[in-house]
Amino acid sequence: MLINRFAPYSLITKWVKGMTEKVDWQWVQKIFGYNENQMEAIKKSPQHLKWIKAFPKLRKIRMVAEVVESRNCMAQLKKGDKYYFKWGGYVLDKSEGAENVCLWAVSQLLPFYLMINDRVAEGLDPDDMIVNHVRCYDVGFRGHCGYGEVLMKVYAETKKTI
């Protein structure tokens, strides 16, 4: 059921009640360190509830940023290198991915992480993003004080393939 800000209050209340019955609130409070006032506010927020309800699904996937092109990369990223991020946005063990974590590259990935989270929360396939490639922040060696450039494809992997 989609809820918008113009929906009758009783409809929102019913929807929120249905959402709260499936949430482990003690876990949420422990993980985020929320006080009682914050917990009450979150329980009344349809946006927070939708995201919190998606946690079990999000915990089963990781975001992957795979290098598909690389030229003159100072971090020495090469085609096929990958960065892995688990559901909280944390970089996974570097032994599993690219040797160097490049701030210029990973700084561009937050919008993709948010898109994947949003798609999962909405019940959509996270790999069906229309925009799924991004360049690193470096402008490349073209006389503009850049060094190199990397193009990455971003997608989600489920634990079945991990």
Image (cartoon, rainbow, N blue to C red):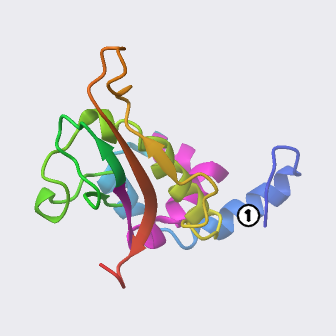
Q: Main secondary structure of the magenta part?
A: helix
Q: Quadrant of residue 36?
A: top left
Residue for badge 1 = 15
Specify whether residue 57 is painted magenta: yes
Image position, residue 35 (x, y; %): 38, 42
Give the position of the N terminus as an image quadrant: bottom right
Question: Relative to residue 129, is residue 82 drawn left or right?
Answer: left
- Compared to residue 56, the image places residue 67 above or below, namely above
Instruction: Work out whether residue 161 or residue 51 is closer to the camera in this orientation and state it.
Output: 161
Which residue reaches farthest front? 142
Instruction: Work out whether residue 43 or residue 109 is closer to the camera in this orientation and state it.
Output: 109
Image position, residue 147 (x, y; %): 26, 26
Q: Quadrant of residue 120?
A: bottom right
Instruction: Work out whether residue 20 or residue 65 is closer to the camera in this orientation and state it.
Output: 65
Specify whether residue 27 is painted magenta: no
The reply to whether residue 24 is visible in this rendering is no
Q: Quadrant of residue 11?
A: bottom right
Q: In percent of the image, x 34 and y 82: which residue is there?
A: 161
Question: Relative to residue 105, is residue 57 drawn left or right?
Answer: right
Question: Relative to residue 161, is residue 147 drawn left or right?
Answer: left
Tell me the crowding category of disc 1: few under 14, some 14 to 19, or many 20 or more residues within 10 angstroms, Cα based. some
| SS for dot 1 | helix
Q: In percent of the image, x 58 and y 72: which residue is there?
A: 21
- Compared to residue 26, the image places residue 125 above or below, namely below
Amino acid type shown at disc 1: Trp
Q: In percent of the image, x 79 and y 56: which residue is there?
A: 3
Q: Which residues are magenta?
A: 38-67
- Compared to residue 136, the image places residue 133 above or below, namely below
